[in-house]
Image (tube, grey):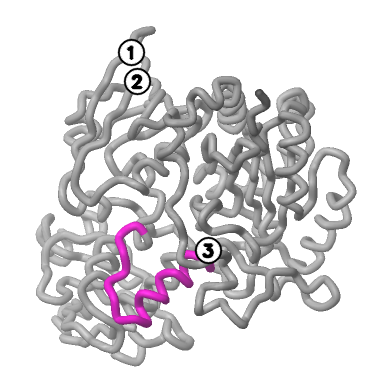
Amino acid sequence: MKFPLPILVAVSLCAASGTMAETVKDREGAVRKDKAAMENDARWAYNDLDRAFAESSRTGKPLLVVLRCVPCLACAGIDSSILTEPELVPLLDQFVCARVINANALDLSLFQFDYDLSFSAILFNADKTIYGRFGSWTHQKNQHEKSTVGFRRALERALELHKGYPANKALLAGKQGPSSPYKTPVNIPTLDGKYRLELDWQGKVVPSCVHCHQIGDALRTVHRNKREPVPEELVYPMPAPETIGLTLAQDSVGRIESVASGSIAARSGLMKGDDITSAGGQPIISVADVAWVLHRAPAVGSIPIVVNRAGGTVSATLELPVDWRLKSDISRRAGTWGMRAMATGGLQLEELSEADRSAKEIPTDGMALRVKHVGEYGKHAAAKRAGFLKDDVVVEVDGVTKRTSEGELIGQLLRKHPAGTAVNATVLRGGKRVELKLPMQ
């Protein structure tokens, strides 16, 4: 019997206007140059997922989907390495490879990943069963980081899963995303009518492209426009392992570099040097797979985890307490920019250092969020219009005075207050307490 086979697809997504990520000077030129270089490439099926899946079925090879924002400078290093590194060739030869440069027509029930990354990958079986995901915040933060070791490990692990398919299909069930109410990004209400499924190659191509982070932005806006709480998984998408106290090595499948004292991970008994092989009942192929397990985890509950320790297998359980997601650091996410407009009127906030807390006589357990930036335009200028100033120190919001990060505050406000309302806020300014109204949008 012949079974459906896996596929490797590289997806390169062009940036839409409005993204806060650093981009190349000539974005239009970068996208067109990429097309000219890749559309006839012998290895990569360019911008054609149907062809890639069909080729996977025909050849019996798997399919890797790399999602890459061409004009974005973040992750430029790993993208370049994957396209040119000779050492990767024998590994890539075992996959059907495709490069897609826009998110407009992505099937949202199939392509669920970290929308805030400018480079991601999904590895498929030809029947569209997902083997795993890859994405690196290390590369996102450093455009010069070119290491492909973690990427290679993910491909190798996917090939192992492919060899065991379909006998292992039940173990892969958790890797499949839930159904989506929208077929593609251009069907989401706030994007519908503004974008088409196809790029405008005859005109301006970059403005016609849906950037990945716009998917998350649009989904959050749907809830906001309905005056509904924004779901936690949209406020804190794909939580990093650090959220539960784990730091994982980027050059491995899931090796634990450190465990934070007193964290969820520490209470589970996980240790430095453990290699995570399974989480939530799913085989792990990369750090991004761990983030996916956390993304799909319950608001409160437990996650079984299996590690290799000193050559033996050890089982543990992660017990997730109430509001565990609020510890996720979302400060550098592109999607957080839009949530700042919704929750804080366009303010960008950062916690005061311990020295500055002491100088201002703010207790260690008290709220102390310095206004790092005040938006100047549109909805991002709402806080400015309400009287907030750069370097104000927010010490109370909506009656809450306990120590709170920017991410925690955003989540609390988006879950509790609909658009069109305002909450009481207190700031320290020039040694005085000033009472203001923080606008919700």
**Residue 265 in which image quadrant:** top left
Residue 399 falls within the magenta-colored stretch: no
Mark pair 2, 3: CA separation: 33 Å
- Residues at circles 1 and 2 in contact by the CB criterion of under 8 Å: yes
Residue 216 falls within the magenta-colored stretch: yes
SS assignment at label 1: strand
Q: Nearer the viewer, residue 111 or 86?
A: 111
Q: Main secondary structure of the magenta part?
A: helix
The residue tagged 3 is 213
The mark lying in front, picked from 1 and 3, is: 1
Lower position in the chain sequence, tag 1 or tag 3: 3
**Is residue 346 left or right of 169 when viewed as pictured?**
left
The residue tagged 1 is 313
Lower position in the chain sequence, tag 2 or tag 3: 3
**Is residue 205 left or right of 172 when viewed as pictured?**
right
Mark pair 1, 3: CA separation: 38 Å
SS assignment at label 2: strand
Mark 1 is on which residue type? Thr
Q: Position of residue 119 (x, y in %)?
A: 60, 49
Q: Position of residue 340 (x, y in %)?
A: 37, 73
**Is residue 12 left or right of 281 when viewed as pictured?**
right
**Residue plotted at (64% across, 29% down):** 3
Find the magenta span and give its range. Answer: 214-233
Mark 2 is on which residue type? Val
